Amino acid sequence: MVLRTDIFDKLTETSPPIVRSNGDIGKCMEDNRDGFQISDLLREMILAGDDSENACPYSDAERDELLWRLFEHVVLGGSCCQYEDKVEPYVETSKRLYKELVCAQKDAASGKVQTVSAVYKINSIQGEAGPLELFPSRSRQNFCYAAVDPVRRIVKILYHAYVPYW
């Protein structure tokens, strides 16, 4: 798992920059994809992926990191949300969620900080009578993460069920 937040630096290194050096998110022509409004290059990159005019600067492995997944969820928001013009609120909220979910500690042997939590994305639950529905409808914004902290022996759950506004 990622422990540093320099993963977000790539957003300013694209051409044209998805995020400008002052933190402003680049704008684009309005579009709608998968039920989400796209009005900036950040959401366009997240939703269009390889189909984007602005190539995604992130590898599949980077996009699979928990911090990046949280960032994507925060950027896309809910069905009735007000988007930000600057990237900083998205980054800060993602970092706070990450810190709340994941337990990190120093490795006694190496002295390096490492995560000790195991995080699982739960897509469905099998009950005695069959599968249980976790989400009211299908959406890429449906998520349920279970973070297991072996040090304190607790499980933290982050759950969001996307309900379309219209």
Image (spheres, rainbow, N blue to C red):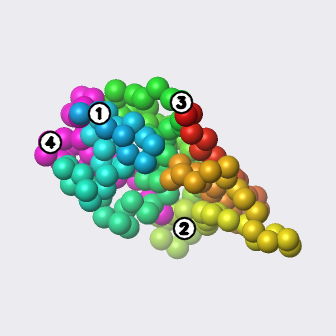
115 up-or-down from 85: above or below: below
SS of the residue under disc 2: loop
Mark 4 or mark 2: name the one nearer the start of the chain.
4
Tell me where the magenta segment starts and ends, as one range. 1-28
Q: Amino acid at mark 4?
A: Pro
Residues at discs 1 and 2 in contact (Cβ within 8 Å):
no
- Mark 4 or 2: in front is 4
Mark 1 or mark 2: name the one nearer the start of the chain.
1
- Locate residue 150, reporting x and y percent: 70, 66
Q: CA distance from mark 3 to mark 1?
A: 17 Å
Q: Which mark is residue 30?
A: 1
166 falls in the magenta region: no
Q: CA distance from mark 4 to mark 2?
A: 40 Å
Q: Amino acid at mark 1?
A: Glu
Mark 4 or mark 1: name the one nearer the start of the chain.
4
- Mark 1 or 2: in front is 1
Q: Amino acid at mark 2?
A: Asp
SS of the residue under disc 1: strand
Left or right of 35, for residue 123 = right
Mark 3 or mark 2: name the one nearer the start of the chain.
3
- Locate residue 28, reporting x and y percent: 23, 34
Check disc 4 and report the residue beneath it.
Answer: 16
Closer to the camera, 140 or 138?
138
Residue located at (79% from left, 71% from top): 130
Check disc 2 and report the residue beneath it.
Answer: 107
The crowd level at tag 2 (other Cα within 10 Å; few <14, some 14-19, many 20+) is few
Query: Can residue 81 be seen in this snapshot?
Result: yes
Closer to the camera, 52 or 69?
52
Query: Can residue 23 be seen in this snapshot?
Result: no
Residues at discs 3 and 1 in contact (Cβ within 8 Å):
no
Check disc 3 and report the residue beneath it.
Answer: 80
